[in-house]
Amino acid sequence: MALTPEQEAEIEALRASPRPTLRAVSEGMEAHMYRAHPVLDHGFVRVIDYMGDDAAICQAARVSYGKGTKSVSNDEGLIRYLMRHWHSTPFEMCEVKFHVKLPIFVARQWIRHRTANVNEYSARYSILDREFYIPRPEHLAAQSTANAQGRGEVLEGEEAERVLEILKSDAARAYEHYEEMLSQEGGRKGLARELARMNLPANIYTQWYWKIDLHNLLHFLRLRADSHAQYEIRAYAEVICGIVRDWVPLAWAAFEDYRLGGATLSARALDCLRRMLAGETVTEESSGMSKGEWREFRALFPGQG
Amino acid sequence: MALTPEQEAEIEALRASPRPTLRAVSEGMEAHMYRAHPVLDHGFVRVIDYMGDDAAICQAARVSYGKGTKSVSNDEGLIRYLMRHWHSTPFEMCEVKFHVKLPIFVARQWIRHRTANVNEYSARYSILDREFYIPRPEHLAAQSTANAQGRGEVLEGEEAERVLEILKSDAARAYEHYEEMLSQEGGRKGLARELARMNLPANIYTQWYWKIDLHNLLHFLRLRADSHAQYEIRAYAEVICGIVRDWVPLAWAAFEDYRLGGATLSARALDCLRRMLAGETVTEESSGMSKGEWREFRALFPGQG
Amino acid sequence: MALTPEQEAEIEALRASPRPTLRAVSEGMEAHMYRAHPVLDHGFVRVIDYMGDDAAICQAARVSYGKGTKSVSNDEGLIRYLMRHWHSTPFEMCEVKFHVKLPIFVARQWIRHRTANVNEYSARYSILDREFYIPRPEHLAAQSTANAQGRGEVLEGEEAERVLEILKSDAARAYEHYEEMLSQEGGRKGLARELARMNLPANIYTQWYWKIDLHNLLHFLRLRADSHAQYEIRAYAEVICGIVRDWVPLAWAAFEDYRLGGATLSARALDCLRRMLAGETVTEESSGMSKGEWREFRALFPGQG
Amino acid sequence: MALTPEQEAEIEALRASPRPTLRAVSEGMEAHMYRAHPVLDHGFVRVIDYMGDDAAICQAARVSYGKGTKSVSNDEGLIRYLMRHWHSTPFEMCEVKFHVKLPIFVARQWIRHRTANVNEYSARYSILDREFYIPRPEHLAAQSTANAQGRGEVLEGEEAERVLEILKSDAARAYEHYEEMLSQEGGRKGLARELARMNLPANIYTQWYWKIDLHNLLHFLRLRADSHAQYEIRAYAEVICGIVRDWVPLAWAAFEDYRLGGATLSARALDCLRRMLAGETVTEESSGMSKGEWREFRALFPGQG
């Protein structure tokens, strides 16, 4: 359970009192406000605030005085045009702020996206909670034999049990020792928090406020909702995908078509396609591609050749 | 007059229909929404959207589940602490979007602030309006004789008249020629807009949507509302200062005290102050400062020495 | 002629005295150092400094202690892999600094790329030179009738002559008036430089130092060396392409294959390709694409359907 | 010992072969190239590359064709002027690339500085080394009783011994279990590296390539070489301070005077100083400052009042 009853009550209190605003409102997003979407065993994603909607993208693209919307179909066409031609600045005109609870090893990947604003819970100032990510058995993957940066099959039997036992007992011991080092009982001074935290493993949970514009958020999702991303960060990205879909449905649909479901092909790949369309049978050898490129190309066009 | 009746009507229509939201609302900012604050002869600043308020700064600093506010005095103390110790990330958690109409030479200074999002009216795609900035007589300043980058006295008499005549007639002629080059009448093809615009002078007005977080906005205001900034961009900065004061009054008060009204002193200057407080009479020679530093130091502490 | 004899002499003096360094050296880039590549009628691009080479990309990707290079073919494969999978951070490890002279309307497009460092010649502090961009007859394009943001045929005859006459005479008059307003002769005070400049048209030349990392430079080149970019900025981008090719030949080759010569296809486009490869004849109607998308798709695969 | 003999040999090989370059060369920086400056028990900082020197700052500020240097004293005055008036862009024209080895909890603070380029050693792809930061006894500080975010006295006796024992034994056990989970011996599949790393504590060492411009580096140093920064990151900042001093001595001297040794005073503090200079005795009550502000003010001006 990610939230305490007190925290749930605070959230319900915030949701209980809507106030009038003259700003653009996204009904889809209002439904998400403050609610905690659970992720992994103790994590969550909550929408704290947002700015703009689909119409705001068009309004900025047109630098208009009023709403900037002409009609939904007109807006849809403009948004698809902007997405197709990499006109990123209108998408930067929407902004969203999340409260996220996540394991530190996920936070370390996440923070690599620099074009965002972050306030993290301070382990110099405060004491971290006793909450650790322990993978569910079906996520206990073996090292991939094909790909140095990937996962293979799922561990089973004794091996899986031993791994879970290690993760649980090491976390428990590390946290006990963290508390012991901090303790000021029995005349002890207590180690500084900023030092004691160094004993905690990377699966302990932290939390932060994270604010980002829609263009950079979509870039984050393209990389982190991708099948090559580590499962644990992908779990967060997928929850955020669902939120974005409700917030800006037209931008989301364009993103799905042009980015998530699309592909960037090299000059070599385009040339192979042209030859294949002209009836030629192209092989790895005649493609001019490396082994890896060819494999990726065949995954996109499996039926042919 | 900066807006047409149609544009005014669009703005009033937007202001006529408040909608409920669960987000943080700043009453001071709602009063500004969409309205055009006039600047210079044809320019304006309009608030199009905003995110957050004073409480949101505290909420992010505390990474809290609920409002994050304990009491106004508590929040004020926290905000002053954050400002004093250059903790900039909580201020990044507020965001604002403006629609600005401004002369191109002002836009060229403004755009140097890179940590912002911009959509500018495209003179490749559209035709610019016939609106040029012509300074009022009291802003027709001579080149400073003391400072290569400054203004001196105000021009007067024939010299002032001649300057105004030049600015007006050159602008008028440039715009007539712009229209002539674009014209497709009489069998002409009409020069491409992206080329014809090169004939227009830097005092023609452009407009853009500009979105920025509060931390970076305050940095912009510190530089551009400063007495060393060019008058024409300062006029915009001062209007924005008034808007920020209404939006986040606690953050604004801390900014006024620590930044606008404060000063950064060098180690040499601190040393001089200590000596002066101990009763020593410090002179330019004994200060160790350069002529310019000493002048700036004396401006801060005029009564002594 | 873009440079004075004194400036040429300064450049030759800089090129005359190589000094030993322990840093990575790119021979291809050393040949460019300081030299002015002419662009348009009075502009240029000069390399002032650079950091890193192809090997530095690999070294950073491997976080290695030494050179990080194993073999040229190994490095080539790694660089292609990084480019293909959008691993941008190793490319950020190379940096380049240019001195560019360019018309103001080009500078205004250029500066929209925010992830770069810029120092521009100050028209508040200094007086601009009397140099204006006047297009060559073959670049005097008409407004496109198909595309609001494009160029059509070239202007001819009287229309072309009239346009050139306007551009030349307006520029000459604007500059004379600029000088007149600045003048302190005959008891005049002289208008402040920061004000007088507002009379100058957008085809006057400015100059700046521009520093950017290789990843962001390649992004700039992808957008600005593209056939949809305005000719005048493309002229600069193409000169820079030639410089990058000499600086980091492996990264350049990967960029050419995956970005300049490649294409991003939507989910719909991929689906159409799969159907076409399976023998189906896909039409605009059955493609599910908009008119614009279909036109772009057919431009990539012209022979089929 | 931070480096193996093989690594030392690679570094010496790189230092053995200077090559000619036409770029700006900083002799002070050449002496640092590639060498590992030890920090903490297993960490280091190495300069991998740099761009620019003091003269390059002036050259960019002047947008000049040649060296841009007139004389050393002239350059010094310009650099001090730029620093005093927060003209940051010329300092952005210098760049430096470091290879740093550092504990993960230090890396987590460090990465908060977003305006930099980073390539970190990947624990998804590779196996981390068995190296953990264990504080020296004199750095084993107690939690401050005055400041929630600070250190107090040093732990002693049994308490200190127990803390060191915990840190060492937990690190050893965590690493043994890390290896055990990864192991593919005895028919085991071996847990994926990206999962196994979650068991490792925050004092394990990681390493990265970190590239940043001089302006942003000085900002980093102002915050991280400050007495309020955590000792462990300050140790890195202080080593980098020494490197910057050798690289750009004029910029460093201006930074020391205006930033490290200087102070930003609020309007209230300036007012108090003026009153004190006029002979008034100002007390905490009559200062209008909060308790914290007054304490900081008195620390700057200890002799008076």
Image: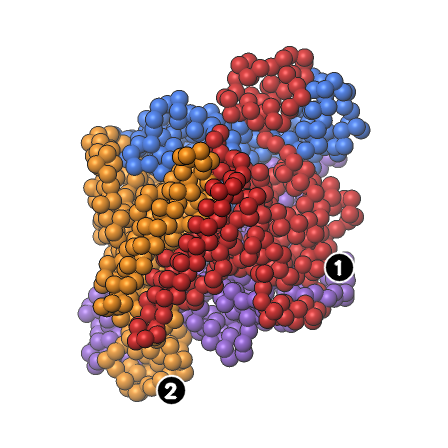
Chain colours: A red, B purple, C blue, D orange
Q: Residue at x 58, y 67 (%)?
A: A4
Above or below: residue C203 compared with residue A7: above
Q: Residue furthest right?
A: C285
> Which image quadrant for residue C46?
top left
- In the picture provided, is B297 more to the left or to the right than A107? left
Which residue is painted at 22% across and 45% down in the image?
D1
Q: Residue furthest top?
A: A280
Residue D177 seen: yes
- The kind of secondary structure element at disc 2 is helix
Residue underneath mark 2: D286
Q: Which mark is residue C144?
A: none
Task: Using the image as rendered, state which of residue D76 and residue D32 is in the foreground.
Answer: D32
The residue type indicated by label 2 comes to Ser
How packed mark 1 is, by other alpha carbons closer than 10 Å (few <14, some 14-19, many 20 or more), is some
The image quadrant where one finds the C terminus of chain A is: top right
Three-letter amino acid code of the residue under disc 1: Glu
Q: Are marks 1 and 2 on the same chain?
A: no
| Neighbours of disc 2 within 10 Å: few (<14), some (14-19), many (20+) | few
Are the residues at dot 1 and dot 2 in contact (C-beta closer than 8 Å)?
Answer: no
Residue sitting at 32 percent across and 45 percent down? D130
Q: Which residue is mark 1?
A: B10
Tell me which chain the residue with mark 1 is part of.
Answer: B
Provide residue B225's location: percent of width, then percent of height. Answer: 48, 64
* Residue A186 position (above or below residue B94): below
**Which secondary structure, mark 1?**
helix
Real-space Cα distance between discs 1 and 2?
Answer: 52 Å
